[in-house]
Amino acid sequence: MAGIAALTAAYVLSQFFRSFLAVLTPALMAELGATKADLSVASGAWFIAFALMQFVVGVSLDRFGPKRTAAVLLGICGGGGAFLFAAATTPWMVTFAMALIGMGCAPVLMASVFIFAREFSPARLAILTSTLIGVGSAGNVFGTSPLAAAAEAFGWRWVIAALGVLTIAVALAIAVLVRDPAKPQGHDGSTGFAGYLELFRLRVLWPLIPLTAINYAPAVGIRGLWAGPYLADVYGASALVIGQVTLFMALAMVAGNFIYGPLDQILRTRKWVAATGNLLSLSAVLWLAFHAGGGIGADTVVLVLIGITGASYGLLMAHARAFLPAHLTGRGVTLMNFFSIGGVGAMQFATGAVVTASTVPGEPTAAYRTLFLFYAAMLVVALVAYLSAKDAKPAAIRG
């Protein structure tokens, strides 16, 4: 349990680092001359680096175990990237720092999921993963009004530098406290990257991939990147107001994980829980698209709903895990995580281009209506594909 606690602390940091740019948007624009497009690229760099590292992480988990994989990457890349961010003087340094931090955070959640998949019954995977994400999402909360207040009191550079020190301390705790699970008999992880080819031959996974790639994108993209510019451009909101609104959305994302977690056991289905939840997410995004600028109170309520319904990641991971061979557990969960985080990263880049292309001078809502419609269209495509997926009804939890 001490090892899981250390990994949970690391996941709190991971959630913080993927979502804190929205609150620092005014400071980074003023001090570094960063544009919205620059910050979109920087945010996307975190997710793309994180996603591409999943292939290395998957092989490392199966071959070396979660202890060394998580501790080394988090300490060197995560801590180093935070220090570089704190010292940044140009937008490209922010982007490079975000990519390094993404590499450092890449193994954290997967190390935990790997341990859950190896040491607990499959029936518990959805609730264990969702609970971990729910607790870890405190980092998402810290990246809202608490960060805004700390940055105003001490300066954003000192705050991020302190987080670099904390990141290295957590990496050391992982190295000391995490215990690697035993490997399956007859398999030592030596198939390396070839194991991914075996996974791609599992056609049962194919319909799950689009929704895995898109379900999280609207919530994390709006919360971590677009909420700040949207509220500032449309309502003239200050950093503290942005922090308060994104705090509510972050708390909703925490709650969403705890809501989704037990539903597969209660309703005896994973597919239809995920499909229904993401249909609600689609409805909320569409409402925002057609009512953008209608009032900051109403928008906050809809953002909260997007936060809750966009938290189906743990459920989708459990759905996919039901079809994975035991000896490819590490590579299987990281493959699905690659699509999840890679989808978010790709959407960060794409949404930056969408907002830039659809900006109308003197009409700030135009670009954001197009942005929300773009998120909705991607969700529609993913949901249609997911409807052909085979359900994986969970076994009853015993003991």
Image (spheres, rainbow, N blue to C red):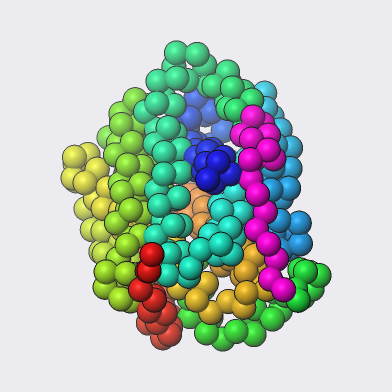
Q: Quadrant of the C terminus?
A: bottom left
Q: Is residue 205 magenta?
A: no
Residue that lies at the very extreme toward the front in this rendered image:
399
* Image quarter of residue 72: top right
Q: Is residue 171 magenta?
A: yes
Residue depicted at 52% across the width and 84% down the height: 204
Q: Nearer the viewer, residue 78 or 184?
A: 184
Residue that lies at the very extreme toward the top in this rendered image:
153
Residue depicted at 40% across the width and 52% down the height: 131
Q: Nearer the viewer, residue 215 or 345?
A: 215
* Image quarter of residue 153: top left
Q: Is residue 272 above or below residue 154?
A: below
> Going by the image, does 145 lie left or right of 289?
right
> Going by the image, does 31 lie left or right of 60?
left
Q: Is residue 158 above or below residue 366?
A: above
> Going by the image, does 371 lie left or right of 202?
left
Residue 211, percent from left and from top: 44, 70
Q: Nearer the viewer, residue 220 or 315?
A: 315
Residue 359, percent from left and from top: 41, 48
Count of numbered circles in the view = 0
Residue 14 visible in this rendered orientation of the protein? no
Residue depicted at 39% across the width and 76% down the height: 395
Residue 270, percent from left and from top: 36, 73
Residue depicted at 32% across the width and 42% down the height: 251
Range covered by the magenta-colored residues: 168-185
Q: Is residue 290 above or below residue 149?
A: below
Residue 166 visible in this rendered orientation of the protein? yes
Residue 100, percent from left and from top: 69, 42
